[in-house]
């Protein structure tokens, strides 16, 4: 138990090297309960570092797991950050520590690494965040481009934290565990309620030390993925930090790079261990001599190709984007995408179809063709490329457009079209046009008025082959990733000399690349627990008669402890539905259950949520029920009526 300045004690698991000499100590700091899912399932990283001479600590955030206190919100500013500062300094003072500490971890633990580092603890020598954001409003699980997230609003993280925070501490690890558990049940508020209420960027989202790059004063290793929903933040951190830094950017989604699909998979812990060796030990490592960026360059893949492995190759770079990058623009006109401003003024109209985007979901082992999305979008296509064209960085769309309603979304999809017509998604972006002057400054549109909209697409690496065509598809929806707009806002897109709409791509000139990184393949994970994860099941149903589309997702996993008597399970289902006839009246339902089972302590925590909307309001109905040894123990229901603020 680690003390903090206000007397709250944080519960830690310490993995120590078998040595008598002092060693560095690195911390993974999350609310995911270090002895449960997902905390204990990630103990393989702690074993890995301890085997290589670095003490590793899994640390429960206050109010979670076996730490003291009650968790009040995501990141609990400023207590959670100050707690992290205090924990590092306490650990640095232990006789087995050499006085140097580090922070590392995936997702939430990556966020806390950045947040605590900005307080500049004296002992902190380096950090290694993986898939971590710099902006909780636009680049997290809450809002995208100023529009409410769809899948995520009551998805496995949002609803899963409701059930996770309702599980008890472990009796053998926590004094007065029953009293602490009861206190948490009474005082915990589901985080997702506040997220839906805070629909505009501002003090709430920025309080947890977001884009304050200059406050980071320690060497930083960043690991990101082109398929991760924090891809943009990974690139921005690398661009803005002014410290010794390194970025490893692979093709991965939000999954550790040694087990991610698509691969190639790498021994990412080896790269982090090299970072600790360089900055926390008294010995150097050749990692300092390498170029600062290790990037996976993605080459073309057919949409019907197997999704297990992304085609491409690794490359070193000195900067991202590289200094040799040259922006190239394609103008939107009646002949598609062209290198020059169209001679004639151009106007294209698109009907509002609220379920455009459903083709992005991988519902099988392939990538998924974009034709279904493009048939419902305004589409611009280039002539066949006369040479191979590589892009690396942020695509941008400058769009002159009008809408038929006060609130309208603009979704842009960049695709690679093969000679046979197969269309593969490369990157996409979305802007709630009412946030055109800032995410903190929503302004209603004047129907029919033409606006200049700047839309950043997600950062990407891609090589368009010679003979392929570049395609841009524009629509008013990105379902189910984004909650449908409050009205059927038709779009008009303008092009020509008076309204020069254009797509700008970060093109890398062809040339010989001399240096390539050598990355190790994954090694078997060492864990004290047995972790069983069932494949995620995703499905889409489209009722053509009612023009309804429903997306469903199911997840299930289990953890068995080495004590032979403790098992934790997690199950989740999300369903979200929208109708083209009444797009404002979307509805999402979610169900999440976690169980902790051992002799004498059998706890089940079940949360059920429904979020629905009309044109003006969100309606949330959320219940949580907890059973103890088969009998009802605690329950509560929350209902909220929340006005929609131009989204």
Image: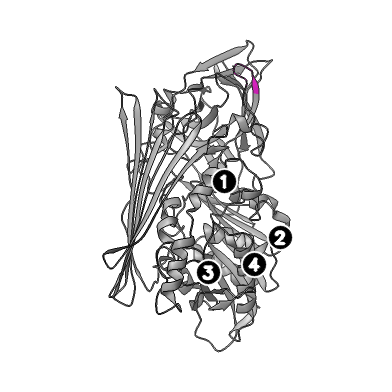
Q: CA distance from mark 4 to mark 1?
A: 24 Å
The one of 581 and 492 positioned closer to us in this rendering: 581
Looking at marks 4 and 1 on the same chain, the residue that comes earlier in the sequence is marked by 4
Q: CA distance from mark 4 to mark 2?
A: 22 Å
Residue toward you, 309 or 466: 309
Q: Which mark is residue 243?
A: 2
Pointer 3 local density, CA inside 10 Å: few below 14, some 14–19, many at least 20: some
Indicate yes or no whether the magenta region holds residue 83.
no
Secondary structure mostly seen in magenta is loop
CB under 8 Å between discs 4 and 3: no
Of discs 4 and 1, which sits in the foreground?
Answer: 4
Disc 4 from disc 3: Cα separation: 14 Å
Q: Which residue is mark 3?
A: 69
Residue at left 46%, top 59%?
Answer: 266
Residue 373: numbered disc: none
Mark 1 burial class by Cα count in 10 Å: few <14, some 14-19, many 20+ = some
Q: Secondary structure at mark 2?
A: loop
The quadrant of the image that shows the C terminus is top right
Which residue is pictured at 47% across the width and 67% down the height? 183
What residue did someone put label 1 on? 139
| Foreground residue among 508 and 360 | 360
Q: Mark 4 sits on what residue?
A: 82
Q: Nearer the viewer, mark 3 or mark 2?
A: 3
Looking at marks 4 and 3 on the same chain, the residue that comes earlier in the sequence is marked by 3
Q: Is residue 447 magenta?
A: yes
Q: Mark 1 or 3, which is nearer the eye?
A: 3
């Amino acid at each position: 138990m680690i003390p903090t300045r206000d007397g709250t004690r944080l519960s830690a698991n310490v993995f120590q090297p078998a040595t008598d000499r002092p060693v560095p100590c690195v911390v993974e700091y999350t609310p995911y309960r270090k002895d449960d899912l997902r905390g204990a399932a990630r103990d393989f990283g702690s074993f890995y570092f301890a085997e290589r001479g670095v003490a590793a600590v899994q640390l429960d955030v206050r109010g979670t797991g076996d730490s003291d206190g009650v968790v009040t919100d995501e990141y609990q500013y400023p207590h959670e950050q100050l707690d992290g500062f205090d924990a590092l300094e306490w650990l640095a003072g232990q006789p087995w520590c050499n006085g140097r500490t580090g922070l590392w971890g995936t997702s939430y633990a990556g966020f806390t690494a950045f947040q605590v580092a900005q307080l500049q603890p004296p002992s902190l020598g380096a950090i290694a965040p993986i898939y971590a954001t710099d902006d909780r409003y636009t680049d997290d699980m809450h809002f995208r481009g100023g529009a409410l997230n769809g899948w995520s609003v009551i998805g496995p993280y949002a609803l899963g934290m409701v059930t996770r925070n309702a599980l008890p501490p472990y009796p053998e690890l926590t004094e007065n565990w029953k009293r602490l558990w009861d206190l948490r049940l009474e005082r915990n508020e589901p985080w997702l309620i506040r997220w839906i209420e805070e629909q505009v960027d501002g003090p709430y989202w920025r309080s947890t030390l977001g884009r304050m790059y200059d406050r980071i004063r320690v060497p930083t290793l960043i690991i990101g993925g082109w398929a991760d929903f924090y891809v943009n933040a990974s690139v921005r951190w690398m661009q803005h930090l002014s410290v010794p830094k390194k970025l490893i950017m692979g093709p991965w989604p939000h999954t550790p790079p040694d087990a991610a699909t698509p691969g190639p998979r790498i021994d990412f812990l080896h790269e982090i261990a090299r970072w600790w060796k360089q900055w926390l030990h008294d010995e150097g490592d050749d990692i300092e001599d390498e170029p600062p960026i290790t990037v996976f360059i993605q080459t073309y893949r057919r949409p019907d190709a197997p999704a297990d492995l992304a085609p491409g190759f690794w490359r070193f770079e000195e900067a991202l984007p590289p200094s040799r990058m040259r922006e190239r623009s394609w103008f939107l006109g009646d002949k598609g995408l062209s290198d020059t401003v169209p001679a004639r003024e151009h106007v294209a109209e698109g009907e509002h179809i609220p379920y455009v985007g459903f083709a992005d979901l991988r519902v099988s082992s392939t990538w998924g063709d974009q034709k279904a999305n493009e048939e419902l979008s305004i589409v611009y296509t280039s002539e066949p490329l006369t040479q191979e064209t590589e892009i690396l960085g942020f695509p941008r769309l400058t769009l002159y457009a009008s809408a038929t309603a006060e609130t309208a979304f603009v979704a842009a999809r960049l695709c690679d079209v093969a000679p046979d017509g197969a269309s593969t998604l490369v990157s996409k972006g979305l802007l709630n046009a009412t946030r055109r002057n800032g995410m903190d400054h929503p302004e209603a549109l004047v129907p029919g008025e033409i606006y200049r909209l700047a839309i950043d697409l997600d950062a990407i690496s891609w090589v368009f082959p010679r003979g392929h065509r570049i395609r841009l598809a524009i629509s008013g929806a990105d379902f189910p990733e984004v909650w449908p707009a409050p009205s059927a806002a038709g779009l008009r897109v303008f092009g020509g000399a008076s309204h020069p709409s254009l797509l700008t791509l970060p093109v890398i000139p062809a040339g010989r690349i001399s240096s390539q990184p050598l990355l190790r393949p994954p090694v078997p994970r060492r864990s004290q627990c047995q972790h069983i994860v069932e494949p995620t099941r995703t499905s889409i149903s489209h009722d053509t008669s009612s023009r309804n589309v429903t997306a469903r997702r199911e997840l299930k996993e289990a953890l068995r402890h080495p004590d032979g008597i403790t098992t934790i399970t997690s199950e989740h289902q999300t369903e979200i539905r929208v109708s083209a006839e009444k797009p404002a009246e979307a509805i999402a339902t979610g169900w999440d259950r976690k169980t902790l089972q051992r002799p004498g302590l059998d706890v089940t925590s079940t949360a059920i949520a429904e979020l629905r909307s009309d044109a003006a309001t969100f309606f949330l109905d959320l219940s949580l029920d907890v059973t103890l040894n088969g009998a009802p123990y605690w329950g509560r229901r929350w209902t909220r009526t929340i006005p929609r603020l131009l989204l």
